[in-house]
Amino acid sequence: MLLTKRVYKRRNPFFGVWPVLKKEIIHIIRDSWTFYFVVGITIAHLLIIGFGVNAKIRQVKTVVYDVANTQESRELVQHFINTDSFNVVTRVNSDKELYDALITGKARVGVKVPVDYSRRILSGQSANVLVLVDGSNAAVTSEVINVTVGLTLKESLKKFNISPQIQARPSVLFNPDTLTPFFNIPGVVPFEMELIITFLVATAVVRERERGTMEQLFMTPIQPLGMMIGKIIPYGAVGLIVESEMFLVGYFVFDLPINGSYLLLIALTIPFLIALLGMGLMISLIVNSISEAVQIVVGQTFPSIYLSGYFFEIDSMPVAFQWAAELLPTTHFIRITRGILLRGAGFESLWKDALALLVMGIVLISFAAIAFKRKRA
């Protein structure tokens, strides 16, 4: 009987499923990081998509140059504001100021009402309104064009009840042909850098801890901050190499324009790398294995995709999610890459993003050094 049972066990291909199944269920329940990855990240993504992401463009920063400055032109500008798609942040008095507001990123849309606007519509003639759209952001371009054309059509029917007399003349700046690679590459490069650098730094520290070499470093007179900086500098160099090769491929293969200073781009990449290196160090402090580090790195990348402004306009998000977006290094670096490569922006319009990245990096690395010092003690 016993022999028959053993033969049955060997011949039954499904024997052992139940005990192994129970073992894996217990492992998943006890493994907090697996539970976090399966449940926590999934729910967080759904909440971000449901509450934070809005495909409809709202409150796009707009600059107005009302040359006519008449009752009719002011009514037209007010109609732009009333759509909730536009947020007039400033009014200018010259074409140069209008274009500068778009180049520096202060506004995404520029509206210019011509000097003869009122005279033409009162005499029954057609009046054109120039609408300049920042073509460096795909999330804004097509939606703004559709809204402005619809708005002017509605205004024409309201005033004249005939064929359109008020016509929007959209002009896409910085990417007039709306080429997809010009939209995507300046946004993809920061994501790739974030994923690669945080992964390399986090796994490098965890690997040394698993091998026991980290404890050996604790026994040396090396200071925690010195150890942190010495450890992350090589990975910072790797980040610069990754960035350069990706932008070079974009330039030679996809004709990606570099309208600004590439040296400025390299210089402003350093604060971004400092922030990423700090993130990698912080991740290495809260995990115990490489697999856990990978889960955290992948999990923290998704909020950057949704909230950084790459796919969805930040100004259209609820205020809480806008603040959350400002805490993401990728948000600031996408502004830098698009500003320099596509709009030709200079340091005077990008220094705030660089400063935010530098502060993030210093804070994260300092916290990591303090944590390592405590472990060493």
Image (spheres, rainbow, N blue to C red):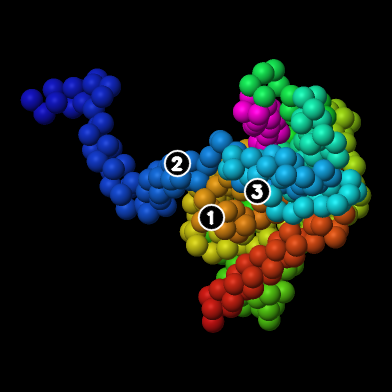
Circle 3 packing at 10 Å, graded few (<14), some (14-19), many (20+), is many
Give the magenta range: 138-159
Residue 220 in sight from this viewpoint: yes
Distance between mark 3 and mark 1 Cα atoms: 14 Å
Residue 50: image tag: 2
What's the residue at 71%, 21% (across, down)?
164
Circle 2 packing at 10 Å, graded few (<14), some (14-19), many (20+), is few
Judge depth for marks 1 and 2 and give the one in front.
Answer: 1
For the residue labelled by badge 1, is the local secondary structure a helix, a strand or a loop?
helix
| Precedes in sequence: disc 3 or disc 1 | 3
Q: Which residue is mark 3?
A: 87
Residue placed most toward the observer, 158 or 176: 158
Image quarter for residue 127? top right
Q: Quadrant of the C terminus?
A: bottom right
Pick out the residue farthest to the front.
123
What's the residue at 87%, 54% (across, down)?
346
Magenta segment: does it hold 145?
A: yes
